[in-house]
Amino acid sequence: MKKLSVIDWIALILIIVGGLNWLLVGAFNVDLVAKIFGGMSAIARVVYILVGLSALYVLFSLGKLAKK
């Protein structure tokens, strides 16, 4: 089994944060990222972008993991 790098861990943590945020949005109509950082502030947008980039990173990394 491949050991996870620091970037892998960061990507996984961001995906978990994004998933939990979507759970809160769907179940309780609460966007925690927006509440913490403010509506569509620059910081909130960066968080959303990082979560999306992390999802792409993990998506493409799964192919590498499957080959091992």
Image: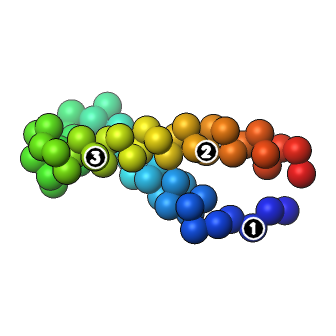
Disc 3 residue type (three-letter): Val
- Badge nearest the viewer, 1 or 3: 3
Q: How many residues crowd around disc 2 within 10 Å: few (fewer than 14), some, or many (20 or more)?
A: some
Query: In this picture, is 25 found above or below 50?
Result: above
Residue 32 seen in render: no
Q: Which residue is mark 2?
A: 58
Q: How many residues crowd around disc 3 within 10 Å: few (fewer than 14), some, or many (20 or more)?
A: few
Secondary structure beneath label 1: loop
Residue 25 seen in render: yes
Query: In this picture, is 9 found above or below 43?
Result: below
Q: Which residue is mark 1?
A: 3
Secondary structure beneath label 2: helix
Q: Nearer the viewer, residue 44 or 18?
A: 44
Q: How many residues crowd around disc 1 within 10 Å: few (fewer than 14), some, or many (20 or more)?
A: few
Counting every numbered tag in the picture gives 3
Q: Residue at x 15, y 54 (%)?
A: 36
- Badge nearest the viewer, 3 or 2: 3
Disc 2 residue type (three-letter): Val
* Marks 3/2: CA–CA distance: 18 Å
Disc 1 residue type (three-letter): Lys
Are the residues at dot 3 and dot 2 in contact (C-beta closer than 8 Å)?
Answer: no
**Sooner in the amino-acid sequence: mark 1 or mark 3:** 1
Way the structure is coloured: rainbow
Q: Residue furthest right?
A: 68
Residue 6 image position (x, y, % from top left): 57, 68
Secondary structure beneath label 3: helix
* Marks 1/3: CA–CA distance: 28 Å
Q: Residue at x 43, y 38 (%)?
A: 52
Residue 30 image position (x, y, % from top left): 20, 40
Q: Quadrant of the N terminus?
A: bottom right
Question: Is residue 46 toward the left or the right of residue 13 in the image?
Answer: left
